[in-house]
Image (cartoon, rainbow, N blue to C red):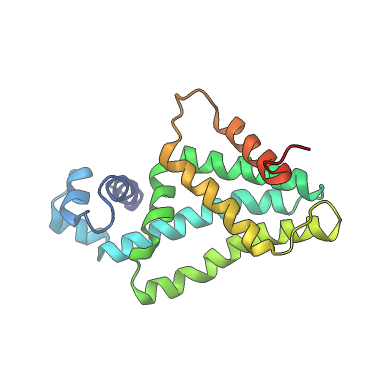
């Protein structure tokens, strides 16, 4: 039994039951350990939650940073970022669900540790929108609002997207990008 096995199981338990509904006993049971043995690997649910959030945000940041640094126009870059982000959410649903829906369960100390990494991630998106504004590709008075709107739309996808559904995650990503770039108004 490895720490990674425990974290993977905890992500699944947190996704199914929520952080507050999950117990250390349920996590131990998911990896066929006695509860006392689980404490040999981790000290608390808070520790598990923070590590899962750091793992998810690190993975997502790595995916997006590589695209954000590419020397391509901002609209192409943002489209690729949207695709990569949604694909990562779908491919890592348990882990990313914990990030998106359980981060509010962090205690104050853990929250303070988590916020700078979250801000670094959001900055990648804002910088790309700002780059598009600076180059005349985008007209956006507030990149922070635009990014929060886009993140809200994309994050909520995890609640309804089904891999066996009639649209691939890539198709959904392209539709989101088109909506972001062109809006709803007929030309």
- Of 34 and 48, the residue lying toward us: 48
Which residue lies at the image location 18% right of the left edge and 49% below the top edge? Answer: 26
Left or right, residue 11 beside residue 116: left
**Above or below: residue 22 compared with residue 86:** below
**Residue at image location 58% in from the left, 34% down from the top:** 172
Where residue 17 appears, x then y in whole percent? 25, 48
Tell me how many marks there are: 0
Residue at the image position 84 percent from the left and 61 percent from the top: 134
Q: Give the percent coordinates (x, y) of residue 89.
A: 49, 43
Residue 73 position (above or below residue 50): above
Q: Position of residue 76 (x, y in %)?
A: 76, 43
Q: Residue at x 45, y 73 (%)?
A: 113
x then y, percent, for residue 79: 69, 42
Is residue 87 shown left or right of residue 55?
A: right
Q: Nearer the viewer, residue 138 or 105?
A: 138
Q: Is residue 80 above or below residue 115?
A: above
Q: Which residue ends up furthest to the front in the rendered image?
A: 186
Question: Could you tell me which quadrant the C terminus lies in?
Answer: top right
Q: Nearer the viewer, residue 138 or 53?
A: 138
Residue 144 figure quarter = bottom right
- Where 161 sits versus 167, above or below? below
């Amino acid at each position: 039994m490895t720490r990674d096995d425990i974290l993977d199981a905890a992500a699944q338990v947190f996704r199914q039951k929520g952080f507050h509904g999950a117990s250390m006993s349920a996590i131990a049971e998911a990896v066929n350990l006695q509860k006392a043995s689980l404490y040999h690997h981790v000290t608390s649910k808070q520790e598990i939650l923070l590590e899962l959030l750091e793992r998810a945000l690190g993975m997502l940041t790595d995916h997006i940073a590589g695209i954000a640094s590419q020397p391509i126009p901002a609209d192409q870059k943002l489209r690729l970022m949207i695709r990569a982000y949604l694909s990562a959410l779908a491919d890592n649903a348990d882990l990313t669900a914990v990030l998106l829906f359980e981060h509010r369960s962090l205690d104050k100390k853990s929250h303070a540790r988590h916020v700078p990494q979250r801000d670094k991630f959001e900055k990648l998106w804002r910088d790309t929108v700002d780059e598009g504004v600076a180059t005349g590709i985008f007209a956006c008075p507030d990149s922070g609002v635009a990014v929060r709107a886009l993140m809200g739309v994309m994050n909520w996808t995890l609640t309804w997207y089904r891999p066996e559904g009639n649209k691939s995650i890539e198709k959904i990503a392209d539709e989101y990008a088109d909506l972001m770039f062109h809006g709803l108004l007929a030309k």
